Amino acid sequence: MEKKESDSGRYVRIGTTLYKIVRKPLLSGDSIEVRVPWNYETLRQDHSKDFISQIEKFDGFCSVPDHINYQHCIGTFLNQYEPINYQPSEGSCPVIMEFLTHLFGEQLEMGLDYLQLLYLKPLIRLPILLLVSTERNTGKTTFLNFLKAIFAGNMSFNTNEDFHSQFNSDWANKLIVGVDEALLDRREDSERIKNLSTAISYKAEAKGKDRYEIDFFAKFVLSSNNEECPIIIEQGETRYWVRKIPPIEKKNVGMLNDLKAEIPQFLNFLLKRKLSTRHESRMWFRHDLLITDALRKIIMHNRGKVEIEMLHIISEIMQIKELKEYEFSIKDMLDMLKRLSIQTEAPQLRKILQENWKLQPHPPTYYTAYLFGYNDEILSSPKTARLYGITQKQLEEIMSEC
């Protein structure tokens, strides 16, 4: 009888579907608990007749994240969200703190806030965290594995291709969606992730099953070897936090195990720590706190070739001629772009100047035009035209806008 009662906990009925609860081994040597669809005929072969009556029954699944006061079931629904496998305990966590200092640098307190909010307030919206570096041994992948060690089955590792697929039931109810070596430079991929980062609900879909609506609370953590265009981020976008990660000076092949060993102490630290930021935007952090040089670099790359070259041309002329203000006509810029084999038209330039840069043309004026000569020297010529003027300060602001 004791055997039967013990075994009954290895099965669960959700609605009319029977599942067996098993431990699936991982390459790391650990194992995770998974539910495998089972059938009643096999169950009857393995157990006695009255065994089915001992199996726990639920009306359906729900997904309610809570790491402090976790509930296995809520009403008559089984919680798909999993409890954290670690319990907070007293002690220090020097390896974790050193690792996070390496990743977040001068933004360490924000990085700790990010992790603390994941742990204590899992329903809060957080920015899309993107770690970039062209160099090796930076710790980007280790950070993703560290998050997986803490949140286990509540984090999904996705590939770039997963965002092209219509089937998403394996990650749609997770707390964290991590992507290693992200390269999501298709606009539809970038738009999907951007929209999901602020979505409240989402349509989940599994192969061969109808779509169904779920509460969506996932946070996206990406790492990439591409510093210029791992994902499309346009000017004015407020949902990204991009950090360039330097190489780790001292290589430690056992770092992940060292980090795992300190997780109980780190959770205790997060439990008692006071947040350094307040809830000031839909992504928690105030937008200006998320602006980094790495973010500017991606935004600059996504401006478009014509706009980037215009900025480079103006910057070069102002620097060489030591100008505090540069005046030019649409034709001047078209001619200089043509010399660089960049084909464009006047309407596109007007749109960049007036809509993107917020510049307005002056009435026809006599001025000195600067043009590129055949040997790339800068020539000057007096002309009369409707001019656009830009100061050094305006140029710097445009180039640094996020």
Image: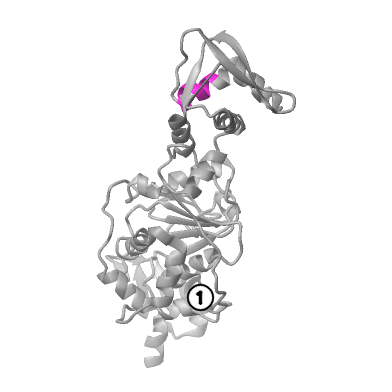
- Residue 61 shows in this picture: no
Q: Main secondary structure of the magenta part?
A: helix
Q: Is residue 350 above or below residue 87?
A: above
In this view of the protein, which residue sits in the foreground, 91 or 31? 91
In this view of the protein, which residue sits in the foreground, 127 or 78? 127
Q: Is residue 8 above or below residue 99?
A: below
In this view of the protein, which residue sits in the foreground, 348 or 310? 310
Amino acid beneath label 1:
Leu
Left or right of 221 in this view: 320:
right
Residue beneath the point at 50% across and 71% down? 36
User: What colour-coding does the image apply?
Assistant: one colour
Q: Is residue 160 above or below residue 336?
A: below
Name the quarter where the C terminus is drawn: top left
Residue range (magenta):
350-357
- Report the residue marked by disc 1: 256
Name the quarter where the N terminus is drawn: bottom left
- Horizontal and vertical percent position of residue 159: 58, 57
Please tell me how crowded label 1 is: few (under 14), some (14-19), or many (20+) other residues with Cα within 10 Å: some
Residue 372 location, quadrant: top right
Residue found at the very far front of the displayed protein: 322
How many discs appear?
A: 1
Residue beneath the point at 71% across and 23% down? 373
- Horizontal and vertical percent position of residue 56: 35, 75
Q: Secondary structure at mark 1?
A: helix
Q: Let me know if residue 176 is in the magenta part.
A: no
- Residue 11 shows in this picture: yes
- Horizontal and vertical percent position of residue 26: 55, 77
- Horizontal and vertical percent position of residue 182: 57, 54
In this view of the protein, which residue sits in the foreground, 291 or 221? 291
